[in-house]
Image (spheres, rainbow, N blue to C red):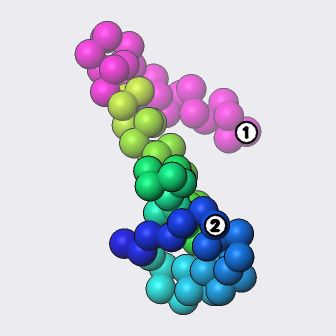
Amino acid sequence: MKVELVTSLKRRATQIIKELNRDNEPVLITQHGKPAAYLVDVKSFEYLGKRTELLEGLARGEAAIQDGRVVSHGEAKKRLSRWLK
């Protein structure tokens, strides 16, 4: 992973973003020698958001199963058919 100082980002933002889009590799931005932020390309950021949504949905489903909040296949089809009309 590439590491850049926050001052470098200020001075070379255009070049750093160009390299980021070319390499698709996150850039760790440091400030006073400590990690401050990650810079990622748009495609990677959107992918991570979609992946997080999917994982959260799976976790909600698992919790529903553990809590007994389930319905039969037939009941699910009946409920969904109302939405599709």
Residue 77 relative to residue 6: left or right: left
Distance (Cα) linking label 1 and label 2: 57 Å
- In the displayed structure, 50 sits above or below 68; it is below
Mark 1, secondary structure of its residue: loop
Please tell me which residue is depicted at 36% across the width and 31% down the height of the picture.
59
Q: Where is residue 32 in the image (x, y as percent from the top left)?
A: 51, 52
Disc on the earlier residue, 1 or 2: 2
Please tell me which residue is depicted at 31% across the width and 10% down the height of the picture.
67
Residue 67 relative to residue 2: left or right: left
Q: What stretch is highlighted in magenta?
A: 62-85
Provide the residue designation for mark 1.
85
Callout 2 crowding tier (Cα within 10 Å): few <14, some 14–19, many ≥20: few
Which amino acid, mark 2? Thr
Q: Which of 6 and 80 is in front in this view?
A: 6
Which amino acid, mark 1? Lys
- In the displayed structure, 67 sits above or below 75; it is above
Mark 2, secondary structure of its residue: helix
Provide the residue designation for mark 2.
7
Q: Quadrant of residue 64?
A: top left
Q: Point out the image quarter for the N terminus.
A: bottom left
Q: Nearer the viewer, residue 38 or 6?
A: 6
Q: Which of 41 and 84 is in front in this view?
A: 41
